[in-house]
Image (cartoon, rainbow, N blue to C red):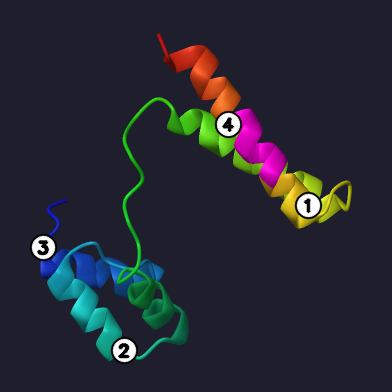
């Protein structure tokens, strides 16, 4: 299916998934849905994730960070610091020549 305003607006109406098409996104904003507006508002500050293999290490590290912090095994700060160290070490070992 082509990513036209018409198609994306219809898809939004059926699924409430925020459209990628900017014209359809504007139409979604007009619906004044709180969650939709929050997601679209976040686009102002968002940056796309890099399309590089190293991101796999970031997601694994982030998973451990969330588990450790949420389980109470570590403080959020200690969880974050440990995750950064593991991510950096793994990237260095696997991707640096």
Q: Give the mark nearer the N terminus: 2 vs 1.
A: 2
Q: Give the mark nearer the N terminus: 4 vs 2.
A: 2
Q: Give the mark nearer the N terminus: 2 vs 3.
A: 3
Q: Residue at x 50, y 14 (%)?
A: 94
In the image, 35 versus 76, the foreground residue is 76
Label drawn at residue 87: 4
Q: Is residue 37 above or below residue 42?
A: below
Circles 2 and 1, Cβ within 8 Å, touching? The answer is no
Specify the quadrant of the image occupied by residue 47: bottom left
Q: What residue occupies the far right of the structure in this picture?
A: 73
Q: Is residue 43 left or right of residue 60?
A: left
Dot 1: element: helix
Q: Main secondary structure of the magenta part?
A: helix
Mark closer to the observer (1, 3):
1
Label 1 vs label 3: CA separation?
Answer: 42 Å
Dot 3: element: loop
The residue labelled by disc 2 is 31
Number of residues whose C-alpha sits closer than 10 Å to that of mark 3, classed few (under 14), some (14–19) or many (20 or more): some
Mark closer to the observer (4, 2):
4
Residue 74: image location, x then y, percent: 85, 48
Q: Give the mark nearer the N terminus: 1 vs 3.
A: 3
The residue labelled by disc 1 is 69
Label drawn at residue 4: 3
The boundaries of the magenta stretch are 81-87
Q: Residue at x 60, y 33 (%)?
A: 60
Residue 30: image location, x then y, percent: 26, 90
Residue 96: image location, x then y, percent: 42, 14
Dot 2: element: loop
Image quarter of the C terminus: top left
């Amino acid at each position: 299916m082509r990513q036209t305003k018409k198609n994306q607006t219809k898809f939004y109406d059926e699924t409430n998934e925020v459209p990628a098409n900017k014209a359809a996104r504007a139409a979604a904003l007009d619906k004044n849905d709180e969650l939709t507006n929050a997601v679209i508002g976040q686009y102002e500050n968002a940056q796309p994730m890099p399309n590089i293999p190293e991101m796999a290490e970031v997601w694994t590290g982030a998973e451990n960070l969330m588990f450790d912090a949420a389980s109470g095994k570590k403080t959020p700060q200690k969880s974050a610091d440990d995750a950064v160290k593991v991510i950096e070490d793994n990237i260095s070992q696997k991707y640096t020549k």
